[in-house]
Image (cartoon, rainbow, N blue to C red):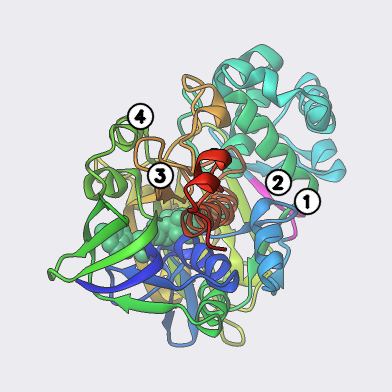
Amino acid sequence: MERALDLVVVGGGLSGLASAAFAARSGLSVLVIEKAGELGGRARTTMVHNFALNLGAHAVYRGGEAERVLSALGVHIDGGVPNASGAVALTARGAQALPVGLVSMLTTGALSFAGKIEVSRLLTSLHKIDADALAGETAAGWIDKSVHTEGARGIVRALARVSTYSGALDRLSAGAAVSQMGLAMKNNVTYVHGGWQTLVSSVLEIVQKAGAQLVTGDGVSSVRRAANGVVVTLADGRSFEANAAIIAGTPRTAASIASESRYLAQAADRAEPVKVATLDVALSTLPRPGCRFALGTERPLYYSVHSAAARLAPEGGAVVHVMAYEADTAGRIEAELEGVLDTLQPGWRDRVVHRRFLPSMTAANALVSAAEGGFAGRSQVTVADMPGVFVAGDWVGPKGMLLDAALASAESAAGAAKVYIEQKRVPAPRRDVSRSESAGAFAL
Ligand SMILES: Cc1cc2nc3c(=O)[nH]c(=O)nc-3n(C[C@H](O)[C@H](O)[C@H](O)COP(=O)(O)OP(=O)(O)OC[C@H]3O[C@@H](n4cnc5c(N)ncnc54)[C@H](O)[C@@H]3O)c2cc1C
């Protein structure tokens, strides 16, 4: 058994690193264990010939929890805000203007006059909708109820998908969709200069400055309760004793390594991963520089030139992410995503510096589902049946989606672990004063 620590954090993605940063900064001794050879998890960025490729399209929601938590850690998000002008709706009748602003609303051929009125009304009234009251309804049901022309439904479905990353609108909570669409439409997003790896590096620097230890290239195989806290065992057989542990991996990881917990087993059973297929492309030049953003209305498709807003490519080059809000289980989506590029950037194939297709990426570990009552149904940071064990990630806590949820839960988990550890260190004063005094038991 290796030395005793205050806290072991399992997982070195952004939620594990942020938990460790908060905990170490508050004075706890912390060890982070990451099974991969490098830190960052899904926030890693691949550098190829000076192009920075995130693992699929990554954007930070402006005004969301991630921004707030990173700022609390002293991390500034350096990036650019994409410009929606000239955005395209990929409809069954071809490419049309995506009606998100006044000009595109007036000019688009994607909507009838009645459809334009419906979409305008909905988008301008999103902030007035009581999202909590819609928590148990599905996004698909709410859209069908609120929007009556089919073209307008297609646009609102596309906006719900791009805001939440969820293709399963028939199971997604309408409350979550409304609040996330409200956030994205009001404030837009930031594409990060240099890719999300820069966020990983900034948080890692804080972790290291605060004195936390790091182990990479070795996964945790179990977290068990012990008389004095928890025992964390690695795949290579090493064990660490700690007062508490935060598990910042998937719900399945949490359930399998903390196998005493029924709470985590149930959380893993309930969690429906939100999957996407993504084609990430580095191009020497862009055939049509003005064509920066598109969404599918009938098909769950996304296209965006991230290098138009963030520094991700060398001079003249471009980084484009094309995505489907579903996994490529039938092996047909790669061709469909290439087809999107053929439509929007004809001639792109001759300018490819690098391309990568990822058929099944987990954008979020748990859909915010109507059946679970929306955000309120997500797992809590405190594992009720394993005192001293906490969880963090995009499947945990009542706040936000994706990185917003991951970082909000990381901050809460670190806070809850700190309180737990302090309570253990300083035993509560005895109530039975008369008996203790008479026995002469106090020696303060
Ligand atoms: C294609 C794609 C697009 C996305 N786009 C956006 C976006 O636009 N906006 C947004 O907010 N979010 C987005 N996300 C989500 C975002 O990437 C994550 O929410 C965020 O990176 C936080 O992740 P995490 O640290 O909770 O989990 P992860 O990054 O998955 O980290 C978990 C870590 O735990 C490690 N681990 C697992 N098991 C063990 C073990 N047994 N022992 C030790 N270590 C272990 C893993 O190796 C991993 O490094 C996207 C995700 C994907 C895949």
Q: Position of residue 249 (x, y in %)?
A: 36, 54
Q: Quadrant of the N terminus?
A: bottom left
Residue contact at pointers 4 and 3, CB within 8 angstroms: no
Q: Which residue is depicted at the point 50% across and 53% down?
A: 440
Q: Position of residue 58 (x, y in %)?
A: 54, 60
- CB of mark 3 near ligand 1 (< 8 Å): yes
Work out whether residue 206 or residue 305 is closer to the camera in this orientation and state it.
206
2 or 3: tag closer to the N-terminus = 2
Distance from the alpha carbon under mark 2 to that under mark 3: 20 Å
1 or 4: tag closer to the N-terminus = 1
The residue that mark 1 highlights is 187
Distance from the alpha carbon under mark 2 to that under mark 4: 27 Å
SS state under label 1: helix
The residue that mark 4 highlights is 270
The residue that mark 3 highlights is 365
204 lies above or below 260: below
164 lies above or below 8: above
